[in-house]
Amino acid sequence: MKRKSLKTRIILTIVLIVTLTSTLFGAALLLLKQRLEEVTFGHMVADQLQVLLTQPDPQALLANPMFKDWHFYSGQNVASLPAAVRELGKGSHHSVRMGKGYYHVEVGWWQQQPVYLLYDVSEWEEQEHALLEALVYGVCIILIAAIFMGARASRAILSPVRELTARVSGIQPGQRKVRLGSDFEGTEIDQIANAVDVYLERLDEFVEREQSFTAAASHELRTPLAVMMGAVDVLDANPQTAPSSRALKRIQRACAEMLAFIEATLFLSREEASAINQGSPANIQSIVETLIEDNKSKLKEYDIALKTTYLSTVVINQPQSVIQITLGNILRNAIEHNDGGEINITLSDRKLVIADTGEGIPEENLPYIFDRSYTTKAGGTGMGLNLVKRICDRFGWKLEVLSSSGQGTSVTLVFPEMSEVSCPRVETSSS
């Protein structure tokens, strides 16, 4: 259930308090008026009845114009009264409806028979109804005023909250040592601002540690790789047998890939749009062929038949290193989950599709395949597809994964910014 906003709750609280208070006040006023009328008219009519009962001719006394609102019934006259009045018990009865008017009725006993003295209180009842109507209108007016006052009060109450929200939203990722508590000291949200400051302080410390680590890791990893590449270059300068030359080339390529991986991961670890070594435009077909060459031993180990179809030559002006990391992870996943099956790689227009006939992914697991912790391999870390997703999000590539358990997986990459050169259909197969 969706919770109401703080502004709505403030307005509703004020409206509820004001409405309840005014309603109770109006009800108390009406009750007090009615009780006063009952007591006043009760004593007055009861006393008048006692006076009438001492008179030899009560009707003659009431014939006086001064008693025009009084009506006395005894003996045979009682039969002319409505049944509802005749059934009243002895004593005072206020606001009894008879015909179109209201009467205060005093029931007594005289000469072993009931007598009734009625006093016309219709005018008083009309005033009471007018008062009740005025109270209803008054409550409605107060309700409208309460809504208006609640809205004004909520704006005043929530003003510091809005200011704090604006300040927090305005903090840029690169800003450090920003503190807000001193600006809200003494206000209702002082504790919230101080709590945000504590979080910002911990975040600054975390970012500083991460930046120190990435800088150190970059330096400490690149240095030994540079030494290895230098040693390989020295060996490559001397005459080598064909197998040794191929091995040296693979070592050189692996070192270059490691340097590219370090550069790409450091790039992804920075939130700001820092530059990455662009190099020359990346040829997707060339990268695919290189990855196939690097994974030949795995393809043979898993007894996989590979088919490639290139319907166009695709050149993209984005870093070759991140493209190689992305496609490499997708291809390795296709190999490692496809024992004795097939892999089809198709490049056309702006789209690269890598489809396998492997074990597939259960439908209930598809939403989690890009999570860092998701893996189906023993000892796996789940970093591969997570890294692929982060790269695609960073560069605006469209990534789509279709899979069904036991029927294989198809991964589609669409590159939005690139130049294309169409070429004749080329198909190659290997097993």
Image (tube, rainbow, N blue to C red):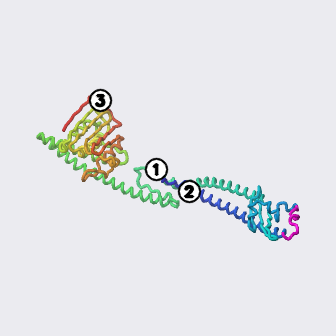
- Neighbour tally class for label 2: few under 14, some 14-19, many 20 plus, Cα within 10 Å: some
Which numbered disc, 3 or 2, marks the residue closer to the eye? Answer: 2
Residue that label 2 marks: 10
Give percent across and percent down for residue 9. Answer: 54, 56
Residue that label 3 marks: 422
The CA span between labels 3 and 1 is 47 Å
Task: Determine whether, in the image, residue 405 is placed left or right of residue 244.
Answer: right
Secondary element at image label 3: strand
Mark seen at residue 111: none
User: Which amino acid is tagged 2?
Assistant: Ile
User: Which amino acid is tagged 1?
Assistant: Gly
Which numbered disc, 1 or 2, marks the residue closer to the eye? Answer: 2
Residue 323 visible in the current orientation:
yes
Secondary element at image label 1: loop
Secondary element at image label 2: helix
Query: Considering only vertical position in the picture, is 296 above or below 186?
Result: above
Task: Determine whether, in the image, residue 243 is placed left or right of residue 423.
Answer: left
